[in-house]
Image (tube, rainbow, N blue to C red):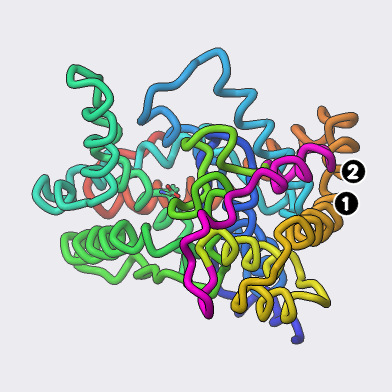
Amino acid sequence: MTTPPATIRKQVLSAIQPTGNLHLGRYFGAIQNWVNLQHQYDAVYGIVDYHAMTMPFDPKGLRDQVWNLAFDLIAVGVEPDNMFIQSLIPEHTELAWIFNCLSSYGEVSRMTQFKDKSQQINDKDKDAFISTGLFTYPVLQAADILIYRADYVPVGKDQEQHLELSRNIAQRFNQVVGQDYFVLPECLFTEVPKVMSTADPTKKMSASLGPKHHINVFSDAEVIRKQIKSAVTDSGDTPTGQVSQGVENLFSLVKAAGGHPELASFREQAMDGTLQYGKLKGAVADVIIEMTNPFREKRIAIVEDKKAYQERVAASSEVVRKKAQKTIAEVKDLIGLMNVKM
Ligand code: TRP
């Protein structure tokens, strides 16, 4: 595919919260796609630390989490010059306030992610602290997106409702100011492999499930091999002709990591009940280790030179900020607020 000239390139924006490490679920489900989209679009990717404050967080660890995730992303191929750190661009929160006043309590209350997350917190502890930030989080997300006039937002299905809210806010703003100022952003869904936990293949791989459930992209080869060795396959009750969820998940991992010459025969053997799980697991570990080897090496090199990378991401945030500053100045002007003279 030829790269379209920069002038007609569409704006892509996505963001990730600096919570937990980069595991295979996050890599295959989102970040690998981010890396590919960089060639075709004008892409910016944020590490959203203001969002990370919506759940209980540790002020002493937050900055390290941001940098560690930045190194992770760069190591797997995200261009540091396409990245920004949200708190280096305070205009996001400024726009979020304006959007708070342009979204209704009712529509924000319908966001299912808030309902799920607050329920989870409540289930663990009835008196737990649920922040107002968690409630208005989708409004900040709308600001992240609209401030760059993004055309496309690569996200998972779970974010569809938040994108709809972003469009509603954009439309309401346009209506209030009587001008088609904001672009209405659209989700960019790409077919991505869904990776389940290796310890419980009925659940999506996620850091919050605990260490046994996710495989860190940067773990040593031996650690990865051991984790795959202990992956759940089946409990012996899978009828002939069918493949258990655990084995299916191992197949997905192999496919996502680029395939294996024996994959088709593994599947046949799984169907007729003759598959040796040890052999399958060896193959899974091989392909994953091969795929992640260059990432591990790159990350070590990045950390050795981390100051330079931190400066690059900070500089890139400065460049990205210019666009946010332009938007916020225009927005304040249109909506009747004062602009600070600079
Ligand atoms: N809400 C997203 C998530 O939980 C993260 C996010 C914040 C985001 N701001 C965004 C995603 C803007 C896309 C665009 O995964």
* Proximity of marks 1 and 2: CB atoms separated by less than 8 Å: yes
Q: Nearer the viewer, residue 273 or 299?
A: 273
The three-letter code of the residue at mark 1 reads: Pro
Q: Which is the main secondary structure of the residues drawn in magenta?
A: loop
Q: Nearer the viewer, residue 142 or 331?
A: 142
Q: Residues within 10 Å of mark 1 (few under 14, many from 20)?
A: some
Instruction: Identify whether 147 is placed above or below 128.
Output: below
Instruction: Identify whether 55 is placed above or below 325.
Output: above
Which label number is shown at residue 294? 1
Query: For the view shown, which residue lies furthest in the top direction?
Result: 60
**The N terminus, quarter of image:** bottom right
Q: Residues within 10 Å of mark 2 (few under 14, many from 20)?
A: few
Instruction: Identify whether 183 is placed above or below 75.
Output: below
* Residue at horizontal 35 percent and vertical 44 percent from the top: 140
Query: For the view shown, which residue lies furthest in the bottom direction?
Result: 1
Is 307 left or right of 99, judged from the image as shown?
A: right
Q: What residue would you read off at disc 2?
A: 297
Q: Which residues are magenta?
A: 216-243
Q: Nearer the viewer, residue 111 or 250?
A: 250
Q: Is residue 267 magenta?
A: no
Which label number is shown at residue 135? none
Q: Find the distance from the CA under tag 1 to the CA under tag 2.
A: 5 Å
Percent x, y for residue 124? Answer: 28, 25
* Residue at horizontal 68 percent and vertical 32 percent from the top: 68
State the SS at label 2.
helix
The three-letter code of the residue at mark 2 reads: Glu
Percent x, y for residue 205? Answer: 52, 49
Percent x, y for residue 23? Answer: 63, 45
Q: Nearer the viewer, residue 70 or 119?
A: 119
